[in-house]
């Protein structure tokens, strides 16, 4: 694979300087042209999100950096914040100019408290360098960033739950519409972008749309940072082009011969070896960057049990399908393990999974059954022997 | 009537849940337009921001709901009301989806039906108990949904053991989390509708549950017992503390003389428990039912409502006299009404420094208890220890009130049991009586005569209207009809959250006999402007109290009526379930219609009231004897819990 242009090769503040020279609509147009999609996993087009917030009329607007990296198997934002915090803050500042916000907030995962002092130091330095505060780089641009500590709830990675938590309420997703781009933090237009998305935005401003689009696929442009863990020889954080196949990725991380790969974390899809030629891209297997490799020795029911245990713990509990559905799926896995789950009940649970995907209030409940459904679908033989048909 | 500048909501509900949010979603400039929704192929034009639920209702399509309630801010959590919206990958909650652009909606596709059924099945898998052993049997929204969606087995199981202990610590409200479906209506009622904030959700996921501060029993936290949560609970998770077995036992005991007083609001609502339309008054059928149930005497709480007006009105005149003539700066004004025990406890918790402003007059319920066990007992030669007084009230807080330790001025517990409308309906059913078909009969003497003023105590503004009818006539000497057509003081009526009225006193008349010992003349009131206000529901009370604290316009008032419940007593926590703004207006209409039908409509013209002052409370209103029996004191409780 050819060497990629990486975050490490970016010149300091080059993107911001580019952005200063552009008008607000031009920045947004650049983002739209780049085709950048949200790196948190949902894949919403970043330019479109910025455009909505820019178009909204309000006295105040906010740029929120979602650094509540909680998806199991994801740790790339931590590395970005550790090694490329300037790039993230630069991206936030560019976003601030684009949408007309003066305030940026980093919602930092509770478990990353140890990063806070380091990040505050970067912010202080940037203020001294006139990269934050009033009259940024001698212009009339005003923008500053503060850090808000999360308290460890997975659900707060969901943007509206994150905003509720910022406002001091229980971190629980809101009804949408209205969307945060119109009615966000304190009821003001707000954009919530993932750490990597903001860093990528700074890269795009610096190197240009063509450079960005040279990597990736038509519908999934650019590079993507992956967190790779599990049964492979070289786990870690990687930059790969969007559209990389599972097989290519496994080769890079010394994970050939895997039984399955979980793409997109606990809420993602479980891909069996027979589908390793599929591409990791929004049009095929979407991901926020979590790759978990399962070797041949892994029992897929153990894998599911682990994931569902996580969701049963992390559902906020407000909507019925998620609050109780995950519990029923977990109990179903336990029944399967004990050989006590009938085929009929397994089908019932799959139907329940379908319901959860369409009837849950937010992305958590909508995606938590994905692993269950894909394991049942893709590892049918492994499970079939463990159901019983003598009802 | 002047406009009432009250502050923006101070609700503790997340801003995103408060009712206004939906309207705002369309963007300020868009509000006012209309939009077309196509529901199941049928077009309907609705104002921008209308929910799918409301739009469907317009064309006769009912979408089932559970967490939605017409009185409450939006939640969208139960997911029973999900529908398909064209262009959306997932189903949308009809109760929470504002229509801001033309949309196409399908309300009962296979996906929708299956999702709803799964939601109901999931709720049933956690809902402990059997329907036939539940107070909400046949009036339970979960049960109704299960029926509607053809649930004939427990797809995802059914709990065999309770998970939570039942909290019976409160005199008023019992919490049984085993039946809770986590719709959070009670939470929204408490933090947003009432702005009290007693209950909240704690924990996460399937371990989340409704609880109080630090999981303390309801009886020992800041709860005003209003019972509004009960009225909005879709299942049997919240219920009132029910004393009907004790009441039956008293009736069954031949040594006991069981007296019941009935408040005005239950009459306007109890028909709902027997399948009648809201607002069907059954006052006289109810009397017959009570007699047939075995109560020895049936009295009208309106009698003591009239007595309250005389005592509270006199107290107001005395306060005004001391403040205006005596220039006594220590006199607490405005005077606040004290009939609503929910409001009284709210003030004791949140605004204890304003206790001196509360009228010391007891509520009509408690006055009646004291009068029955003294005056009535003496007059009829019955030993008060053998009298059991029962109060039929629209209220759950009345149960707490009658158990307040200071309520024993008769030498006994003044009121033994507080029954809610719902509980009495149950007794009537148990006795096999078809209430709407019963013959009519009157109240018993000696408290048989009541006035229209007493009746309207049931609706917000009623106490104020009754007080004004009396005060205007006693002070000005002219008939109130000369100022307000048919003595209907319209400006204090209606469901506006806070009402404010100014009444200039241009002429004064002679001091009537009943007050001669208190004030020499009325000249000191000539040219004054009486300023009064009315607030219902503690959220509105809070607005007024905050205004008073800030020295705003309400601090200039002389008299303010506060009711703890939205709509006043007709919307009380003991009234039939369900409740809604429409149901409460229908009940209020019944009450005002009853008022209009009375010959005597003013408290000071009630002959029985005049008799009690001649025969028993001989030193007059606010005299020594009335102070002992008819007045009380309050407890500063504060908002902090140990």
Image (cartoon, rainbow, N blue to C red):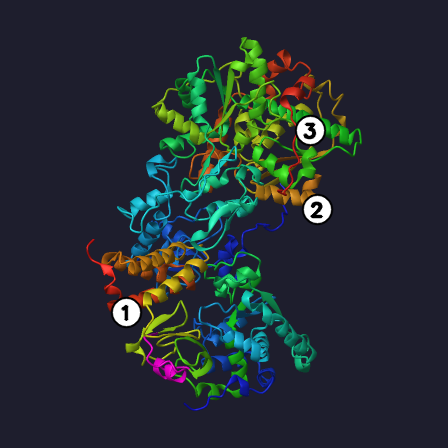
- In percent of width and height, residue A92 lies at 57, 75
Q: Quadrant of residue A113?
A: bottom right
- Please report contact status of discs 1 and 2: CB closer than 8 Å, yes or no: no
Q: Nearer the viewer, mark 3 or mark 2?
A: 2
- State the separation of the CA atoms marked 3 and 2: 23 Å
The answer to if A255 sits in the magenta stretch is: yes
Residue B550 badge: 2
Q: Nearer the viewer, residue A388 or A209?
A: A388
Magenta-tinted stretch: A242-260
Quick check: do tags 3 and 2 share a chain? Answer: yes
Secondary structure of the residue carrying tag 2 is loop
The correct choice, above or below, for A44 with respect to B324 in the image is: below
- Residue plotted at (36% across, 56% down): A325
Q: Is residue A56 visible?
A: no
Residue B365 badge: none
The correct choice, above or below, for A120 with respect to A322 in the image is: below
- Please report contact status of discs 3 and 2: CB closer than 8 Å, yes or no: no
Which residue bears the numbered disc 1?
A379
The N terminus of chain A lies in which quarter of the figure? bottom left
Which residue bears the numbered disc 3?
B316
Q: Is residue B342 visible?
A: yes
Q: Quadrant of residue B254?
A: top left
- In percent of width and height, residue B556 lies at 71, 39
């Amino acid at each position: 694979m050819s060497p990629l242009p990486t975050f490490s090769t970016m010149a300091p503040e080059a993107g911001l300087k580019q952005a200063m020279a552009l008008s607000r609509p031009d920045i947004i147009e650049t983002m739209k042209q780049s085709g950048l999609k949200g790196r948190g996993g949902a894949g919403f087009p970043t330019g479109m999100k910025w455009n909505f917030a820019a178009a909204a009329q309000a006295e105040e607007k906010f740029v929120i950096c979602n650094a509540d990296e909680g998806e199991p198997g994801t740790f790339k934002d931590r590395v970005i914040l550790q090694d490329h915090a300037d790039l993230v803050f630069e991206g936030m500042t560019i976003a601030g100019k684009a949408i007309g916000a003066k305030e940026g907030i980093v919602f930092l995962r509770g478990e990353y408290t140890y990063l806070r002092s380091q990040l505050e130091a970067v912010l202080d330095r940037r203020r001294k360098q006139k990269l934050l505060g009033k009259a940024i780089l001698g212009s009339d641009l005003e923008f500053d960033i503060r850090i808000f500590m999360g308290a460890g709830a997975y659900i707060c990675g969901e943007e509206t739950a994150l905003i509720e938590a910022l406002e001091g309420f229980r971190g629980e997703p809101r009804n949408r519409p209205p969307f945060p781009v119109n009615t966000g933090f304190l009821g003001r237009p707000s954009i919530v972008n993932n750490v990597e998305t903001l860093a990528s935005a700074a890269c795009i401003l610096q190197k240009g749309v063509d450079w960005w689009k040279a990597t990736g696929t038509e519908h999934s442009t650019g590079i993507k940072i992956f967190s790779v863990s599990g049964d492979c020889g070289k786990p870690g954080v990687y930059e790969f082009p969007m559209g990389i196949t599972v097989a290519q990725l496994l080769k890079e991380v010394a994970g050939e011969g895997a039984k399955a790969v979980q793409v997109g974390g606990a809420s993602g899809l479980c891909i069996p070896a027979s589908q390793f030629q599929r591409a990791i891209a929004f049009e095929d297997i979407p991901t926020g960057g979590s790759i978990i490799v399962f070797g041949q020795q892994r029992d897929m029911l153990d894998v599911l049990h682990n994931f569902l245990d996580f969701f049963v713990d992390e559902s906020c509990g407000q909507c019925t399908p998620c609050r109780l559905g995950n519990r029923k799926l977990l109990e179903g896995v336990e029944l399967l393990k004990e050989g006590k789950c009938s085929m009929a009940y397994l089908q019932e649970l799959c139907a329940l999974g379908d319901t959860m995907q369409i009837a849950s209030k937010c992305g958590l409940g909508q995606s938590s059954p994905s692993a269950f459904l894909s394991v049942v679908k893709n590892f049918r033989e492994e499970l079939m022997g463990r159901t019983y048909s003598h009802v | 009537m002047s406009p009432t500048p009250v502050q923006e909501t101070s609700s503790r509900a997340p801003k995103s849940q408060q009712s206004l949010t939906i309207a705002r979603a369309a963007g300020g400039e868009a509000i006012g337009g209309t939009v077309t929704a196509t529901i199941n192929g049928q077009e309907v034009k609705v104002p921008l921001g209308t929910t799918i639920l409301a739009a469907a209702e317009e064309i006769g399509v009912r979408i089932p709901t559970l967490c939605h309630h017409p009185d409450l801010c939006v939640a969208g959590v139960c997911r029973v009301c999900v529908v398909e919206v064209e262009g959306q990958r997932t189903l949308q909650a009809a109760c929470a989806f504002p229509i801001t652009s033309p949309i196409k909606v399908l309300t009962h596709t296979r996906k929708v039906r299956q999702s709803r059924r799964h939601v109901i099945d999931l709720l049933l898998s956690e809902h402990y108990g059997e329907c036939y052993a539940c107070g909400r049997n046949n009036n339970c929204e979960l049960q109704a949904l299960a029926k509607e969606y053809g649930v004939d087995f427990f797809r995802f199981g059914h709990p065999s053991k309770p998970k939570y202990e039942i909290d019976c610590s409160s005199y008023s409200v019992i919490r049984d989390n085993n039946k809770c479906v986590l719709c959070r209506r009670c939470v929204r009622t408490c933090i947003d509708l009432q702005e009290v904030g007693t209950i909240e959700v704690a924990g996460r996921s399937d371990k989340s549950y409704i609880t109080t501060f630090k999981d303390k029993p309801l009886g020992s936290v800041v709860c005003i017992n209003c019972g509004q949560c009960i009225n909005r609970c879709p299942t049997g998770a919240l219920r009132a503390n029910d004393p009907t077995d004790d009441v039956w036992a008293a009736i069954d005991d031949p040594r006991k003389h069981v007296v019941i007083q009935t408040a005005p609001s239950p009459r306007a609502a109890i028909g709902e428990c027997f399948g009648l339309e809201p607002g069907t008054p059954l006052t006289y059928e109810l009397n017959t039912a009570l007699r047939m149930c075995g109560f020895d005497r049936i009295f009208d709480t309106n009698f003591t409502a009239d007595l309250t007006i005389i005592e509270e009105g006199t107290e107001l005149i005395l306060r005004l006299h001391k403040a205006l003539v005596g220039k006594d700066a220590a006199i607490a004004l405005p005077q606040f009404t004290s009939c609503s025990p929910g409001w009284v406890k709210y003030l004791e918790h949140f605004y204890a420094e304003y206790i001196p402003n509360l009228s010391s007059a007891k509520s009509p319920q408690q006055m009646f208890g004291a009068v029955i066990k003294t005056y009535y007992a003496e007059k009829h030669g019955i030993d008060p220890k053998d009298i059991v007084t029962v109060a039929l009230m629209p209220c759950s807080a009345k149960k707490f009130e009658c158990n307040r330790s200071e309520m024993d001025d008769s030498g006994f517990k003044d009121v033994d049991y507080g029954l809610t409308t719902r509980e009495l309906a149950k007794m009537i059913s148990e006795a096999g009586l078809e209430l709407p078909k019963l013959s009519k009969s009157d109240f018993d003497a000696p408290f048989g005569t009541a006035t229209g003023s007493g009746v309207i105590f049931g609706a917000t503004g009623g106490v104020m209207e009754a007080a004004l009818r009396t005060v205007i006539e006693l002070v000005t000497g002219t008939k109130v009809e000369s100022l307000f057509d048919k003595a209907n003081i319209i400006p204090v009526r209606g469901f506006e959250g806070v009402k404010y009225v100014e009444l200039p006193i241009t002429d004064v008349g002679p001091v009537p006999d009943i007050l001669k010992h208190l004030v020499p003349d009325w000249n000191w009131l000539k040219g004054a402007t009486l300023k009064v206000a009315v607030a219902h529901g503690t959220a509105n009370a809070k607005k007024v109290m905050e205004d008073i604290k800030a020295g705003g316009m309400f601090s200039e008032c002389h008299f303010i009526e506060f009711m703890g419940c939205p709509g006043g007593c007709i919307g009380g926590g003991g009234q039939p379930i369900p409740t809604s703004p429409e149901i409460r207006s229908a009940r209020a209409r019944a009450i005002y219609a009853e008022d209009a039908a009375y010959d005597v409509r003013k408290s000071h013209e009630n002959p029985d009231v005049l008799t009690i002052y001649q025969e028993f409370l001989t030193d007059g209103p606010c005299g020594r004897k009335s102070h002992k029996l008819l007045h009380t004191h309050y407890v500063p409780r504060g908002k902090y819990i140990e």
